[in-house]
Amino acid sequence: MPAVLAAADFDLPTRSATGYLLRWIVPRLEPVHLLSVLDHRQAFVLFAPQSDIIIGTGHGDVDVFTGQNESIILEVGKYDPREIEGKVIKLLSCQCGVELVPDLVENGAACAMGYTDDYLWVMDADLASVPWADKEFAGKCLLPVVAGLNVLLDGKTAQEALDTELTQYDCYAELEEDELIKSCIEFNRGNAVLLGDGGASIRARPSLALPFKLIPPPPLVMPLRA
Amino acid sequence: MGSKDEWQRYQEALRSGDRKAAAEAFRRYQEAKRLEGKGHSRPTLVNLSTKAKAYPNAIPLDRVPEELEKNPEFFELMKRAMTKEK
């Protein structure tokens, strides 16, 4: 079963979040990636039923998760349960943990993870074309997410993945001297939720191959929406 | 006055609900950071909410005070995030 990665990159926050997935997660996955302009509902409907894990990053609200240019990918009451049945789902988005994540679990997802309030971080807009290089700001919020996803891709349970993410937030918060960034880390940590079967896991993927550990992706050249 | 002290004043202003005072306190916090040599290239506060929200998804830090003053929804978000008060 392939993984479905739905990742928008049309503005600064989606470019930053997707950049971290491109750098550290994409090289571990099979090539079914709904990235950028491919991140829309029709493609999602086509590939999601075949997957064992759905990883999404994009804008969201309490009842909706969106893709490129905020086109709707998943909305409470408006998807076929076949798309999410038995799957482990991680949504890096705002507020989906309030209604959408519980709805996904009620409709048959093995488990779903999200956030109950806005996902906030500071990024360096000058690094928008190489967002993975933004370690000083964005990395402190996004690397814990990457760490949790890597635990899932190692074949461990969703609960272990969430615990890893939370522990990493704690580490970064403790070391952080900038109060604004520290507050963002703690806020995101406090809003992370896992619903459904915490013991759910997926097929383990190969670890990151050596070339990808050393060599980042080429710069992203698609223009950002103003 | 160091940036840590200015941050506490900012949190107090958020708790008091005074948008103008919060904006002014954030400006002073930014200035203190600059004086400490911790100014950065183009730091921007971002979030992944939809356009249904009344605040922007990306706000350069030097424009945060302005947004705090004029936008009650953004002020409430900052209050939740920075003071941990729901």
Image (cartoon, coloured by chain):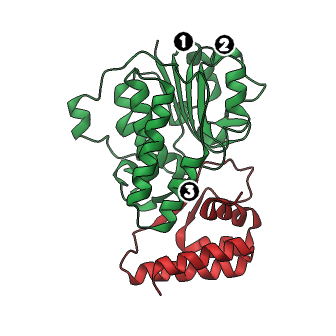
Chain colours: A green, B red
Residue at point 63% right, 82% down? Answer: B24
As drawn, A40 above or below A188 = above
Looking at the rendered structure, whether the residues under marks 1 and 2 are on a common chain is answered as yes
Q: Which residue is mark 3?
A: B46
Give the left or right position of residue A177, taking residue A100 as reference. Answer: left
Q: Amino acid at mark 3?
A: Val
Residue at point 70% right, 32% down? Answer: A100
Let me know if residue A137 appears in the view.
no
Image quarter hosting the C terminus of chain A = bottom right
Residue at point 66% right, 38% down? Answer: A97
Give the left or right position of residue B64, taking residue A107 as reference. Answer: left
**Residue A42, percent from left and from top:** 63, 23
**Residue A172, percent from left and from top:** 40, 54
Secondary element under disc 2, as helix, strand or loop, is: helix
As drawn, A196 above or below B4 = above
Secondary element under disc 1, as helix, strand or loop, is: helix
Q: Amino acid at mark 1?
A: Gln
Q: Which mark is residue A50?
A: 1
Instruction: Decide which of B56, A107 is in the foreground and name it.
Output: A107
Within 10 angstroms of label 3, few (less than 14), some, or many (20 or more) residues?
many
Residue placed furthest toward the right: A77
Which of the 4 quarters of the picture holds residue B17? bottom right
Q: CA distance from mark 1 to mark 3?
A: 33 Å
Q: Which residue is mark 2?
A: A82
